[in-house]
Amino acid sequence: MENIEDYTIKIGLVGTGMIARGLTKLIPKRKDMAISKILTRRQGFVEGLGVDQSYLTTNPLELFDNSDLIIVSTGDPIYSTEVIFQAFKYNIPVLTMDADTQVLTGSWLSERGLLSEGNGDQPGCLAVLKNEIVEMGFQPLVYGNIKGYQNLNPSKEDMMFWAKKQGFSLNSVTSFTDGTKLQIEQCLVANGLDANIAQRGLIGVQTENFQEGAFDLASQAKKMDAVLSDYLVSKESPPGVFIVATHHEDLIEELATYKMGKGPFYLLYKPVHLCMFEIFKDVKNLFYNKSVLLDNGRFPTVSVATIAKKPLKAGDFIEKGIGSFEVRGECIKFSEMVDHVPIGLMSQARLKNNIEPGQIISFSDVEIPDSLALNAWFETIKNNVTPPKRKISTPFRYQR
């Protein structure tokens, strides 16, 4: 390869949503990177691109043939899995801003090629913050996400209003609001940063005081003798991420000098997360150094199960689980219910049984089309989870 300072990394984009559209405006402004092709399933004109429509292609091979690295952000983990798997056949490194795919098939994919989640979305931001504070001697106790608002079962009318106002798809806005996206993000954080979860669906402390809420989670982590992945619901807190950590007792006074308080808990946070604006350091680290910021881990212990939002009947068809009005996602330990259907697989699915609100949907409850993602999921389960001796698929009603 020519001198790094003179080389232009050819980046292929997968997806034409908000993240990809932002990248089409950012990348052309750089001298060290260029867009090669943009893979899309959309037909016709795509609005909001920062480059000419000629960059669009529906042919994955055209993307692979012209790219040094690809960035995947589709919101469809079944589709993303197919594309990433094919990219690895071309020895192309893949950077995701796609926690949905990471928690569904990321562990399986990482065994087959170079895969990393990028900085900018909450999991990547937490990975960067962790690396920074560990170098300063802090020991993380809570990896925290922050939601300003949450409604586990929002109305379609409200979501259509906000989707139009904010420029997101209806599925995206719904998954933000009902907590599915946050649960997916904190699942990736748990698996990728070697943390645990306190309970199904996480704790989710509601607070008007950022530090008090964060320290509440830290106290619960301390009682459990565990490092936790969790979140706050707080309109008053910054829209970023935080870590509550401890430090060595003989440095209490020094930390107090720098306005960190007197311990034992210390709150370190990033007040914003800027998605595609923050990903470029990871592009260079992955391409030049093969350095992975964050992935789902080889032996994941946490998943995101499909939970019914309302009574569902046998025969009901669910087009897409993430961001739907029928189901939402919740963090769950594999050991709690191995045969749960992960929310990322709940696509083009038809129910075989009646389902109660709050019930976890199991594979015995639903018909799901065959896919590479489905096979990868079962292989992940087979390789990483010891099946319990007792039957675990008995439906139960969830009580928050």
Image (cartoon, helix red, strand yellow):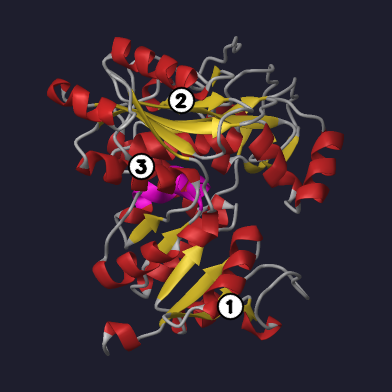
Q: Amino acid at mark 1?
A: Asn
Residue identifier under label 3:
380
Comparing labels 2 and 3, the label whose residue is closer to the camera: 2
Q: Residues within 10 Å of mark 3 (few under 14, many from 20)?
A: many
Magenta region, residue range: 98-108
Residue type for callout 2: Ile
Report helix, strand or loop for mark 1.
loop
Residue neighbourhood size for the residue with mark 2, other residues' Cα within 10 Å, grouped as few (<14), some (14–19), many (≥20): many
Q: Earlier in the sequence, mark 1 or mark 3?
A: 1
Residue 382, magenta (yes or no): no
Q: Is residue 35 above or below residue 181?
A: below
67 sits to left or right of 343: left
Instruction: Pinpoint residue 89: horizontal percent, then vertical percent.
Output: 37, 71
User: Label 1: which residue?
Assistant: 59
Q: Is residue 38 visible?
A: yes
Where the C terminus falls, by quadrant? top right
Mark 1 crowdedness (10 Å alpha carbons): few <14, some 14-19, many ≥20: few
